[in-house]
Amino acid sequence: MDLYRSRRRLSIPKAIDTQTEEQLGVQEKRFRLFGVMRITEILAYFMVIVPVLLVIMVIFFGHDSYDQGNGFAKASRIIQIKPNVTSEDDSSLQRDQNPKDSVDVSLLGGLLVPGFNKDMCLSRYQSHLYRKASPYKPSSYLISKLRAYEELHKRCGPGTKPYSNAERLLKPKQTGDPEPEGCKYVVWMEFSGLGNRIISIASAFLYAMLTDRVLLVEGGEQFSDLFCEPFLDTTWLLPKDFTLANQFTGFAQHSPRCHGEMLKRKLINGSSVLSLSYLYLHLAHDYNDHDKMFFCEEDQSLLKNVPWLIMRTNNFFAPSLFLIPSFEEELGLMFPEKGTVFHHLGRYLFHPSNHVWGLITRYYNAYLAKADERIGLQIRVFDEKSGVSPHVTKQILSCVQNEELLPKLSKPGEEQHKQPSEDEEEGSKLKAVLITSLTTGYYEILKTMYWENPTVTRDVIGIHQPSHEGHQQTEKLMHNRKAWAEMYLLSLTDKLVISAWSTFGYVAQGLGGLRAWILYKQENQTSLMNPPCGRAMSPDPCFHAPPYYDCKAKKGIDTGSVVPHVRHCEDISWGLKLVDNS
Ligand SMILES: Nc1nc2c(ncn2[C@@H]2O[C@H](COP(=O)(O)OP(=O)(O)OP(=O)(O)O)[C@@H](O)[C@H]2O)c(=O)[nH]1
Ligand SMILES: [Mg+2]
C-alpha cells in the first residue's frame, strides 16, 4: 500500500541521526590522538596538510560550497526530496530531467520571463515543484502581448521620465502639455477582500494590456508583503506620493470626475474629454447604469484620450470585455481557450512573497505532500453567526461522497477487522483533505467522522485545516498572509470543492486550472440543496455584477446569450463567466 511511501520518506531524519553519531565517534578519536602527539609534530602536520586540504576543497567542493551560501539552492534541494508525486505527475518529473524542458516548466510554458532575483521571490521559481503542469498552454499571441506589456511598463513605470511627465498633468497648476505619444495609466484602487482584489487586479491588467496602458496598484506595504513584483526591473506599486493619492477616499460614484456621473450630466464628449488629465471609473458591485457605460464601444473610444484612469473595482469584469467589439479579435487571439483568462493572468501576476511562500510550503510539506491524492474543500459560510448548519453539513457530505471525491463510511457491523490482502492494501490510498474555513465546525465533523469510522474503500482520510480566523480582518497583515496562503494551497490540490459566490474559491480554482465542484448556495438553511454541487464549466471566476445593455441598440439585453463563450455562471444566475464553446 502506498501509505508506506510516507514511511520511507520519514527515514531521512533517522539517517541524519546516524550520521551525527558517527561524526561524534570520529571527534572522540581525534581528541585521543591529540593527547599523545607533541606540539611540534602537530605543527609540522598542520603546515603540510592544511594547504593540501585547501587545494582539494577548491577543486572538488567549489560549486557545492557556493550553492550552500545560496538560499535558493538550499530550498530547492529540500523540496526535491518531497516532490508532488501523484501518478499523473510522473511525466512532469521526467520532463524536469531535460534542462531545457525544466526551464520551460518553471517559466510556465513561456508565460514568465527569467532574470528575476531568485532569492527575492522563491515562489516564482519553485511553484512548478508543487503544482502539476497546467493542462492549458498560453497562446503565443498572449506571450507576445505580455512581453510587449513588460517593455511598456519598464519604459513608463514609476521613476521614469514619461511617468514624471504624465504625473505632472495631474498637478493643480498643470506644468506639462498632454503628449500625444505620452504614456497612459490605469490605477487600481485598494478595495474589498483579498479574493476580490486578486480577481479585479487581473481584470484591470487585461484592460491595461488591451488599451496600451500601464497598470499601477495601490496597496502600499501590505501589498508588497503578500506579492512579489510581477514585472522585471520596475514596479507595479503606485508610489506613495502619487499626486492624487490624498483624494482617493473622496472618489465615489457621485464625485465630479466620475465617468458615470459626468455622463449623467452630459459633460463628456469627444472634445471635452481632451482636456481631462484623469477620470475616476466606478466599477464596483454597486455601480449604476451610467458607470456601466464603461463597457460600451463609444465610451472606450472616449476614454482612450484620458492619460490617467483611476479604477475602483472588486469584480472580475473580463467577460464583459469580450463583448466590446474593438477588443473581441485581440482577446480571441490571446485566449483561444476562453475560460482560462484568470488562469493564465493569475499565474503570471500573483507570486506569493517569501513570507507567504514559507506558509505555503511548510504546510504543504507537513500535511499534503505525502498523500496519494489531495482534495481541497473551501467552506465559505456568509452568515458567520449561524455556526454549523446540519443542512450545510449534509450538503458537503452528499457532494464529496456522491461525486466520489471522498469514500463513504462502512456501516456499523460492516467494519473489516481481518488483515487486508496485498491487493486490497495496494489499492487503498491516503487522501489528504485541505479544508479552509473561517470556523472549525465542519472540520471537526469531518475529522471525527473519518477517524471514528473506516471507509468502504479502505482509503485513509486525513483532514487538515490551516487556520480558523473567525471573521474577515483585511487590515491585519498575518490574516491576509494566511488567506493568500490558503487560496494558494487549495490551488495545489488535485480535486477542489468551492463554495458558491466566493471569490476566495474562484482564485484557488483559477490558479489551479481546475474545474471545481461548486457547493450551491442554500437560499434558506431549512432544506437540502439538490443537487448539492455541480462542476464548474471552466476555471475562470464569475463576474458577479455584469451590465445588461446592448450599447448599439441602446436597450437592455441578456448579455449571457450574445456569444457562446460568455455564459451565465453556475452559482449566480445573473453573473457572467467565460467558458469554452464545446
Ligand atoms: N484564512 C482564511 N480567511 C478567510 C477564509 N474565508 C474568508 N476569509 C477572509 O475573508 C475574506 C473574504 O473576502 P474574499 O477573499 O473576497 O472572499 P469571499 O468569499 O468572496 O468573501 P466576500 O468578498 O466577503 O464576499 C478573505 O480575503 C479572508 O480575509 C478562509 O477560509 N481562510
Ligand atoms: Mg469576495
Image (cartoon, helix red, strand yellow):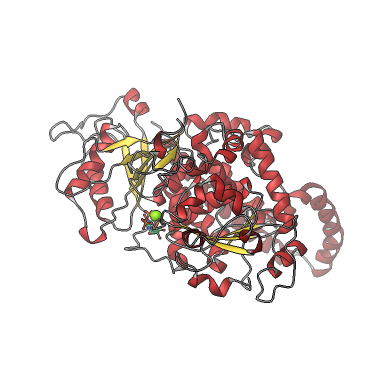
Q: Position of residue 315 (x, y in %)?
A: 45, 52
Q: Report the image quarter containing ligand 1.
A: bottom left
In the displayed image of the protein, which residue is found farthest to the left?
A: 413
Q: Is 419 placed left or right of 515 in the picture?
A: left
The quarter holding residue 65 reads bottom right
Q: Is 558 placed left or right of 525 in the picture?
A: right
**Viewer-side residue, 382 vs 284:** 284
The quarter holding residue 554 reads top left
**Viewer-side residue, 269 vs 132:** 269
All told, the count of numbered labels is: 0
Q: Is 478 placed left or right of 30 in the picture?
A: left
Q: State the quadrant of the C terminus.
A: top left
Q: Position of residue 189 (x, y in %)?
A: 52, 63
Q: State the quadrant of the N terminus.
A: top left
Q: Position of residue 165 (x, y in %)?
A: 74, 66
In the image, residue 232 above or below residue 518: below
Residue shown at the point (26%, 32%) measured from the top left: 402
In the displayed image of the protein, which residue is found farthest to the top?
A: 423
Q: Position of residue 344 (x, y in %)?
A: 56, 41
**Viewer-side residue, 292 vs 337:** 292
Residue shown at the point (83%, 60%) measured from the top left: 45
**Viewer-side residue, 443 vs 308:** 308
The quarter holding residue 394 reads top left
Residue shown at the point (51%, 62%) measured from the top left: 262
Can residue 76 be seen in the rendering of this structure? no
Can residue 276 be seen in the rendering of this structure? yes
